[in-house]
Every structure is written in C-alpha cells, then in structure tokens.
Image (spheres, rainbow, N blue to C red):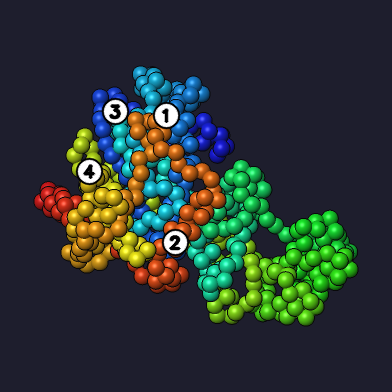
C-alpha cells in the first residue's frame, strides 16, 4: 500500500498492533465506547531552537475523512494468527469495528503556526478505542512534517539573515527517507523553501519545480564547453549551469564562453563542491568582469542553516540562491521531533501521568496566545472549558500564568484587555469534518512567513535562542499540583 493510497483509502490499519489489541480488549470488556481525551504535544525543541512550525494537519484530515475498515482490512485481520495458530482477533470484534463509523472530535492548531513545548497541538476525544486508533497516524504525520517545516524555516531564515531575500530550493529527493519524498517536500515548502527539484511532488502539490543539471550531463560530452552550449541551446529559459565537474575556475570560464557563443542569457552558475565562500567570490568577480552582472550564484553541497549563515554573515559570500538537500529532508541533526499522544481525561475525569521529566498536564486543554505590539508575548495553557477568557480578541480578565520553562512557582500576570487568541480550532465533530483546513501550499507557505514575522528575533537565533514563555493558567496549575500530590501520596 503506497503512502497516497493509505491517505485516500483511510485505512485504520495505519496504526501499531497494540492499538488493535487494546481496542479488542476494551470491546470484549465492555469499555470500547467509554469516552476519553488524548492530546499530542512535544517536550523538547529540535535543532537547538526555541520553536516548531506545525505541519501535516491537512493530510491527517484527509486520512480521517476516508477512515473506515474495508473488507480487505477485515480479511487481513481475520487471517492474522499467533505462532500456535490461534487467531489474533475474534470475529465479534471484527464485526464491531467494520460496522462502526468514526465518532471522534478533533481540535488542532492550524498548519503554518508556531507551537511550543508542552502545548496541545491536537486534542482528540471520543470513544476510547477510536481515539487510540488514530494515534499512530497523527504522530507519524505531525512529527515528521513539523520537524522538516521547522528545519526549512531555519535554513530560509539563515539565507536572509542580512535582510536580503534569497530563495531556498529543496533538492532532497534522492536522499529522503520516505518513498517519493512527498511529505518532506510538502513540509519544506510550508516551512520556507520556494521550489523543489521533486517533479512528482511539485505536480501533486502544485508548487514550483526547479533544477539545473547533473555532473553526468557534463561528462556525456567530450568538452565541458560543448555540454554547456548544448544545454543552453535546448533549455533557453533554464540556463543555470553546474560548473564544478572538473575545475571550478575553468567551469566558470566555460559557462561565460557558452553564453557568449550562443548569445543566450546565462541565468546562473551552481557551485556544488569546494570552498563555497572562496569560489563564490571568485565566480562573482569573473562574471562581473565579463559583463554578466545579473547572473545568479547558486550554492549547494550539504548545506544547513549554520553553513548558510556563515557564508552570508561572516564570509560575505555573494550567493543569490541556496539549494538544500540531505540535511533538510532528513532533519540531519535532529532526526526526530518526539511528539507524544497522552491521555488527558477518561470518562470526564482529568488524568495525569507523574514521572520525572514527563509529568503531563491534566484534562482537555487549549492555548491562549498573547500579542504585544504585533509580537507574540507568551502562551498560556488553559482548560478547554475556559471559553470565556477571550472576548472580541482580547483577554476578558486578568490571567495569572505559571511559567513551565522557569523555576517552579514563577508566574506572570497578563492584564485584561491584552490582545489574545485561542490556538486550537475545532476541525472534526462526531467523525464529521466541520471546518475546512487549508490545503493550498502557497497559502500555508505565506502563513508560516507571516507567523514568524510576529516572533522576536531573539527567539529565532540559530544558536542559544531565547526561550519563549509557556505557562499554565492559575486554575489548571492548581489542578496539576493537586493531582501530583495525590499520586505522590499513593
């Protein structure tokens, strides 16, 4: 079953085996339709940063929209046996799940929005067996796409660190870890890339495709100059040339000659090896001297945000475009976001897990985001039932928030009248899609860009950023402390 087929068929087999084993146990024990709420969140920031960009919601909703056990799914489960020949699933259970419709409710933070540690990004409620059965798909999509979107923005931010707009291209298809690189390309575009080399993904998501040439093309001609001239002749609107197959200086010279001899515009030269700072400066000097001042310089070769920032801010390399592959689509230095899905309430009662470094926040929750002077000024996790804390886009009362990122008991008071918004939106009610989520990637790309414009630069530093304030609303903080003490007393 391919990735796209999985999303389109909505197969609930997009889960771990223990989800089905637990579902069968609940069914046989008469507990399958007891209600619960579970929420997805993450505990640590990737890449040494201080924010994450939410991504993947539209594809999770697409899967939910088609969610059902097909005859093929049921037949597969019916045939599953243990080593001694015992069937893994009873017929009564298979009949139950095949006939049940999706009945869950989903609240979620829209794609392209900033999210921070311990905040609910998804809140899922409904029959306990169905809430559990969507966990794996939700986390699989959310974790991977949010991770890549965040990495992409960090690279795009680095590319414009001096205030000059420079495109970031995604060239990661051949190095990606998922089949077809669809999800990575999608997430990277949401995060900040402007085009992809991945033609299938560009077609599927309706985003721009971009590319130059490979070393193999140059090597298919006896002379590098002939290769360049042929490429320019038959691709007159895509005349960016790869100049480092043999010798970079000679390659730049041949690119200039090819443009002069064909009379065609030399749109760009790409450097994919060597000392990128040195050769970028040399290339700019050679091109300008030959009268090719408008020719763009493109850098590739295992780029990440730190190298891009160094090339621009420290070494003043005159690149106009950056093309990132391996370290973008594999999230090279933080290969996992580590988002989790934890029970928050059961049969209407708040639940808490008490463990060192992993104590959860009890009950169904939402997030209030405060804005001051056009910038995000702090987030407050509150009870989902607290729907009256914001009125007409402003706090309706003073709110005391206990900061989760600082010393125990550290609090801050947000004043009545401060600009504020709830982050989670109701997307699914009783299994029905009640809010259309944005699927246009250009709009999501622009949403991310706008979102990050409201985050102060101190939080966007690539190294040692300031940590954004996330706190618990007073009553939720008190509930959490009460339940912790209850569990500690046994």
Give how far apart the Cα atoms at labels 4 and 2 are. Answer: 29 Å
Residues at discs 4 and 1 in contact (Cβ within 8 Å): no
Give how far apart the Cα atoms at labels 1 and 3 are. Answer: 23 Å
Q: Quadrant of residue 280?
A: bottom right
In the rendered structure, the answer to whether residue 298 lies left or right of residue 306 reads right
Q: Quadrant of residue 212?
A: bottom right
Tag 3 secondary structure: loop
Q: Quadrant of residue 318?
A: bottom right
Which of the two discs, 1 and 3, labels the residue nearer the N terminus? 3
Residue 358 seen anywhere in this rendered image of the structure: no
Around disc 1, counting alpha carbons within 10 Å, would you say few (fewer than 14), some (14 to 19), or many (20 or more)?
Answer: few
In the image, which disc is placed on residue 32?
3
Q: Closer to us: mark 4 or mark 3?
A: 4
Around disc 4, counting alpha carbons within 10 Å, would you say few (fewer than 14), some (14 to 19), or many (20 or more)?
Answer: few
Q: Closer to us: mark 1 or mark 2?
A: 2
Residues at discs 1 and 3 in contact (Cβ within 8 Å): no
């Amino acid at each position: 079953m391919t990735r796209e087929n999985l999303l389109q068929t909505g197969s609930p087999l997009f889960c771990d085996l223990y989800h089905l084993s637990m579902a069968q146990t609940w069914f046989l024990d008469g507990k399958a339709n007891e209600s619960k709420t579970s929420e997805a969140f993450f505990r640590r920031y990737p890449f040494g940063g201080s924010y994450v960009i939410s991504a993947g919601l539209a594809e999770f909703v697409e899967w939910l929209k088609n969610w059902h056990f097909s005859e093929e799914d049921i037949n597969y489960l019916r045939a599953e046996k243990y080593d001694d020949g015992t069937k893994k699933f009873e017929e009564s259970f298979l009949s139950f799940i095949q006939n049940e419709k999706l009945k869950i409710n989903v609240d979620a933070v829209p794609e392209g929005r900033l999210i921070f540690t311990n905040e609910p990004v998804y809140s899922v409620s409904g029959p306990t067996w169905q809430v559990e059965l969507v966990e794996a798909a939700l986390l699989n999509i959310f974790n991977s796409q949010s991770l890549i979107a965040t990495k992409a923005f960090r690279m795009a931010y680095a590319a414009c660190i001096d205030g000059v707009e420079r495109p970031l291209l995604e060239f990661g298809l051949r190095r990606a870890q998922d089949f077809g690189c669809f999800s990575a390309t999608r997430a990277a575009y949401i995060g900040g890339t402007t085009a992809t080399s991945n033609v299938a993904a560009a077609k599927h998501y309706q985003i721009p495709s971009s590319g130059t040439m490979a070393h193999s093309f140059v090597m298919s001609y006896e002379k590098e100059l002939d290769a360049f001239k042929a490429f320019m002749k038959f691709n007159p609107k895509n005349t960016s040339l790869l100049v480092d197959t043999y010798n970079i200086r000679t390659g730049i010279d041949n690119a200039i000659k090819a443009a002069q001899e064909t009379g065609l515009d030399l749109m760009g030269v790409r450097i994919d090896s060597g000392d990128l700072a040195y050769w970028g400066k040399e290339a700019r000097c050679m091109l300008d001297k030959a009268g090719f001042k408008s020719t763009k310089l493109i850098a590739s070769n295992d780029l990440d945000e730190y190298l891009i920032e160094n090339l621009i801010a420290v070494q003043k390399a005159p690149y106009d475009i950056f093309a990132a592959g391996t370290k973008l689509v594999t999230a090279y230095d933080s290969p996992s976001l580590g988002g989790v899905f934890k029970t928050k309430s059961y049969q209407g009662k708040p639940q808490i897990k008490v463990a060192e470094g992993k104590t959860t926040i009890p009950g169904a929750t939402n997030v209030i985001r405060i804005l001051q002077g056009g910038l995000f000024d702090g987030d407050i996790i509150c009870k989902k039932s607290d729907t009256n804390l914001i009125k007409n886009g402003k706090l309706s009362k003073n709110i005391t928030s206990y900061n989760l990122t600082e010393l125990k008991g550290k609090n801050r008071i947000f004043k009545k009248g401060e600009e504020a918004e709830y982050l989670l939106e109701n997307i699914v009610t009783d299994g029905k899609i009640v809010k259309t989520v944005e699927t246009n990637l250009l709009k999501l790309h622009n949403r991310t860009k706008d979102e990050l414009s409201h985050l102060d630069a101190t939080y966007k530093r690539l190294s040692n950023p300031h940590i954004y304030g996330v706190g618990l609303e007073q009553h939720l903080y008190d509930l959490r402390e009460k339940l912790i003490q209850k569990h500690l007393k046994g």
